[in-house]
Amino acid sequence: MPPAEHQKAVTYTTYLKVEELLSLQEPLSDGPEHDELLFITIHQVYELWFQQILHELSALQPALEKGDTHRSLALLGRVRSILKTCVQQIDVLETMTPLQFQSFRSRLSSASGFQSAQFREVEAVLGRRDHAGEDAKEGTGMKMAEHLVPGSLARNRVEAAMARPSVWDSALRYCHSRGHEMPPEVLERDVSTPWEARGDVQAVLVSLHHTDPESAMVCEALVDLDEGLGEWRYRHVKMVERTIGRKPGTGGSSGVGYLASTLFNPVFPDLWAIRSQL
């Protein structure tokens, strides 16, 4: 180890790599256009939040599977707070008018939020297995990542997430570990296939809500997460509609039409289905 006098002091700037961070916003428009920096900054911040959500979910699943209620609630609460922050960021983005966006939109070329591998990974970790979008086909859920470069780290991460148990699978095991017996075929199912809501699972969840307040709190925290994701999707749709109307989106998507198709598809459908039974 070098003598203390030769060691570099850790500062706010070096610890957070501020200089490197502030060099990552590179507008492409001529001038550049004033609002392009805002557009880049907000989307880069979204990617940082997606990274953090994945970090929290990677800790949540083992906590659920160990039956650790308090740890699970803390992690779910943090993810919910992050999603609230993501929604609030849309308020900032909506200060940009349609004409201001049009001033640099052509520079985006084929770039599209649809290409966010981290958001696709978040969806996969939560349990999504089908191909997203209006061109959905029957078959393997791996099609959800088909727009990512084959063999790339991003695609490999999404496909790996679709091949392992989801947060919902971990939640079912949590309930089972606390004495709320789930059907064996549910616990032994092929986790690479889409989950389909089940009446027998819902019956267990209804009973759980009436007999186990701690487990019910975890289930309600999962509903909070699901609702938070839905709020973010809705605000995103309305922001895009406000900015580009019904024009096609960048990257070849249908824009608002595609985004609207993602609404009202809950991540945990069984937890919503039991609302009328409680």
Image (tube, rainbow, N blue to C red):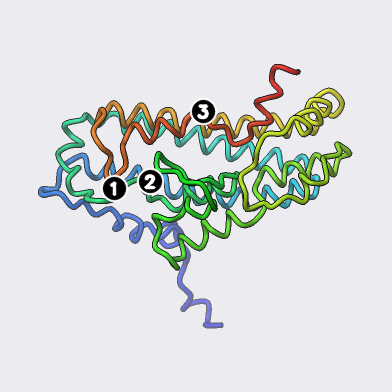
Give the amino acid at mark 1: Gly
Counting from the top left corner in percent of width and height, residue 203 is at 80, 28
Q: CA distance from mark 3 to mark 1?
A: 24 Å
User: 218 or 188: which is nearer to us?
Assistant: 188
Q: Which mark is residue 92?
A: none
Mark 3 residue element: loop
Residue neighbourhood size for the residue with mark 3, other residues' Cα within 10 Å, grouped as few (<14), some (14–19), many (≥20): few
Count of marks overlaid on the render: 3
Give the residue drawn at x 39%, y 62%. Answer: 149
Residue 21 locus on image (x, y percent): 35, 56
Q: Is residue 53 visible?
A: no
> Is there CB contact under 8 Å for labels 3 and 1?
no
Marks 2,1: beta carbons within 8 A: yes
* Residue that badge 3 annotates: 264
In this rendering, does residue 245 appear at all?
A: yes
* Residue 69, image x, y percentages: 77, 40
Disc 3 from disc 2: Cα separation: 18 Å
| Distance between the alpha carbons at the discs numbered 2 and 1 | 8 Å
Position of residue 128 relative to residue 221, above or below, is: below
Residue 32 percent location from the top left of the image: 14, 47
The residue wearing badge 2 is 114
The C terminus lies in which quarter of the figure? top right
Q: Which mark is residue 251?
A: 1
Query: Which residue corresponds to the image point at 56% horizontal and 82% vertical from the top-left?
Result: 1
